[in-house]
């Protein structure tokens, strides 16, 4: 699938230059063009963390955590020198924005990583990315090396192709090399304090570091020229349209319809829109139409913008079949460590398959909601919580389809090709047949 | 009077659902459909502190711990 850029994202938004400025949809234009376009990154006389605080930048890996607070926590964790990581794993199948940045603007991400390493006096700086992105990142690093641009040498580590590979403690676990990329039960000692090789560790999403690169150059007040005072700047969205994913840069606080190019006539053709990916939530087209690009607004609607995934579901597909396949995929993508998640997600997938593909009748949604309650908050990571939110919100938004499946069984659209992407094959359980 | 409260916490990775804890401390621990402990949200009351410590000690997977929390 090709990535396309929205026309209005190609030119810089009025007030300034932002992440997608000047990118044409072709490959990385190279270091010379990058430096020509943006100039040298500046350290702001050791005031970068203050500048980030003033900017109000938050992390765009999904958690929306304030960047300055995270950097301060790493800096103050211990006397040992830290490790900084650009997290480009982006293991959510419906998200492509970090891949897009690494392919088209790797130097923005690398600038941000080196700025973080310098500000935190880190011992190591690592780019963590899937195998298919590594050649591009290697080429970009070689180019910087040739110019002696960076005061620290940048390492590369491969992120495995697994949904949890980008989870913070899983990143650390992958780099520590003992157990692969699976989450730990961090409890009271987060990776900020004890991460890679026991050192304080900053795991920061690739897009977030690209914002850092621009804030270092142009300052906090420049960053705040776009967006709302309590929700400043821009963020990247991956809009999963049927013709392929679209990467859009949205001004925070602006209309989500406008930012995604999904207008009322498009929404009339939709059954629902998934926000925040497979750990996110469904909203009805009506609710979507009222939302701003704002995590607060999304939370009020019971959803999250997460890492910026927007996936509209057209009318000609069966939402229950889509959900069943995603939940089966998510059940298979667990780390297999925590009992409630292992058993709960498998049973949840069984129940959803029975509802989507089985005959009329069935146990309805009671058991499904019961499992959602049982798994929530009971894993070492938030994997089960995300699936519970995905399922619960879906049963609400697709209540009519649920009723019709209960009355008449599997619908005619169940066999339609799936819209929501998953990686690998979905193996369903055999359905329970009723006498 | 203590200004700390006690929190019983399970490490879900270490736990493999042996269920001893729920047998010993049903006041605070129930088992889910798959045999894994569901720990009550309330703080450990002072009169159950001794039992809670015992449960932490006896878990064969060392998956339970008591954490002190300032109120």
Image (spheres, helix red, strand yellow):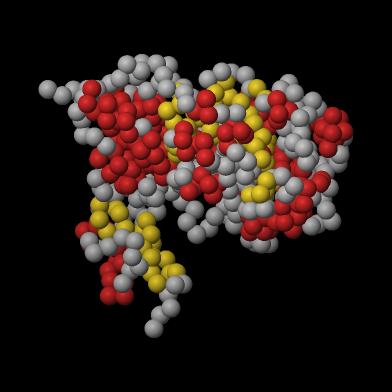
Q: Residue at x 71, y 40 (%)?
A: A210
Residue A57 percent coordinates (x, y): 67, 49
Residue A355 percent coordinates (x, y): 28, 28
Relative vertical location of residue A393 with respect to residue B28 in this rendering, above or below:
above
- In this figure, what is the number of numbered marks? 0
Question: In the depicted view, which residue is nearer to us: A98 or A171?
Answer: A98
Q: Residue at x 86, y 30 (%)?
A: A32
On screen, residue B41 versus residue A222, left or right, reads left
Q: Quadrant of the C terminus of chain B?
A: bottom left
Relative vertical location of residue B52 with respect to residue A187 in this rendering, above or below:
below
Does the image show residue A296? yes
Q: Quadrant of residue A314?
A: top left
On screen, residue A297 versus residue A319, left or right, reads right
Residue A404 percent coordinates (x, y): 27, 26
- Going by the picture, which residue comes out furthest to the bottom? B1
Q: Quadrant of residue A259?
A: top right
Q: Residue at x 31, y 60 (%)?
A: B40
Does the image show residue A335? no
Residue A68 percent coordinates (x, y): 67, 55
- Going by the picture, which residue comes out furthest to the left? A435
Q: Residue at x 63, y 49 (%)?
A: A231
Q: Quadrant of the N terminus of chain B?
A: bottom left
């Amino acid at each position: 699938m090709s990535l396309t850029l929205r026309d209005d994202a190609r030119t810089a938004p009025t007030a300034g230059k932002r992440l997608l400025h000047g990118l044409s949809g072709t490959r990385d234009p190279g270091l010379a063009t990058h430096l020509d376009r943006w100039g040298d990154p500046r350290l702001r006389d050791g005031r970068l963390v203050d500048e980030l605080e003033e900017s109000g930048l938050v992390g765009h890996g999904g958690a929306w955590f304030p960047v300055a607070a995270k950097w301060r926590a790493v800096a103050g964790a211990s006397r040992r020198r830290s490790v900084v990581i650009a997290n480009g794993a982006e293991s959510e199948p419906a998200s492509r924005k970090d891949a897009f940045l690494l392919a088209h603007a790797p130097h923005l991400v690398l600038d941000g990583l080196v700025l973080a390493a310098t500000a935190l006096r880190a011992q190591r700086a690592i780019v963590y990315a899937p195998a298919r992105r590594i050649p591009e990142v290697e080429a970009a690093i070689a180019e910087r090396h040739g110019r002696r641009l960076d005061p620290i040498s940048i390492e590369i580590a491969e992120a495995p192709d697994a949904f949890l590979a980008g989870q913070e403690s899983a990143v650390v676990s992958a780099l520590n090399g003992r157990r692969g990329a699976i989450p730990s039960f961090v409890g009271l000692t987060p990776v900020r304090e004890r991460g890679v090789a026991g050192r304080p560790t900053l795991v920061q999403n690739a897009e977030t570091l690209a914002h850092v690169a621009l804030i270092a150059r142009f300052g906090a007040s420049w960053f705040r020229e776009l967006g709302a005072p309590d929700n400043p700047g821009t963020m990247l969205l991956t809009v999963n349209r049927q013709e392929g994913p679209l990467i859009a840069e949205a001004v925070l606080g602006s209309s989500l319809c406008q930012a995604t190019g999904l207008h009322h006539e498009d929404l009339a053709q939709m059954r629902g829109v998934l926000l925040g990916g497979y750990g996110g939530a469904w909203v009805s087209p009506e609710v979507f139409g009222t939302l701003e690009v704002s995590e607060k607004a999304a939370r009020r609607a019971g959803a999250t913008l997460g890492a910026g995934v927007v996936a509209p579901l057209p009318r000609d597909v069966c939402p229950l079949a889509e959900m069943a396949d995603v939940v089966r995929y998510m059940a298979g993508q667990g780390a297999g460590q925590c009992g409630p998640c292992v058993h709960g997600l498998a049973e949840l997938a069984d129940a959803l398959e029975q509802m989507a593909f089985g005959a009329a009748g069935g146990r309805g949604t009671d058991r499904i909601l019961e499992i959602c309650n049982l798994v929530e908050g009971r894993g070492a990571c938030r994997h089960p919580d995300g699936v519970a939110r995905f399922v619960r919100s879906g049963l609400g938004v697709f209540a009519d389809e649920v009723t019709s499946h209960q009355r008449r069984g599997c619908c005619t659209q169940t066999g339609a090709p799936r819209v929501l992407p998953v990686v690998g094959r979905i193996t369903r359980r055999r359905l329970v047949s009723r006498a | 009077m203590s200004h700390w409260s006690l929190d019983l916490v399970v490490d879900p990775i270490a736990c493999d659902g042996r269920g001893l804890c729920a047998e010993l401390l049903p006041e605070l621990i129930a088992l889910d459909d798959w045999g894994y402990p569901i720990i009550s949200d309330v703080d450990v009351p002072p009169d159950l502190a001794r039992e809670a410590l015992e449960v932490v000690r006896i878990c064969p997977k060392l998956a339970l711990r008591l954490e002190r929390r300032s109120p």
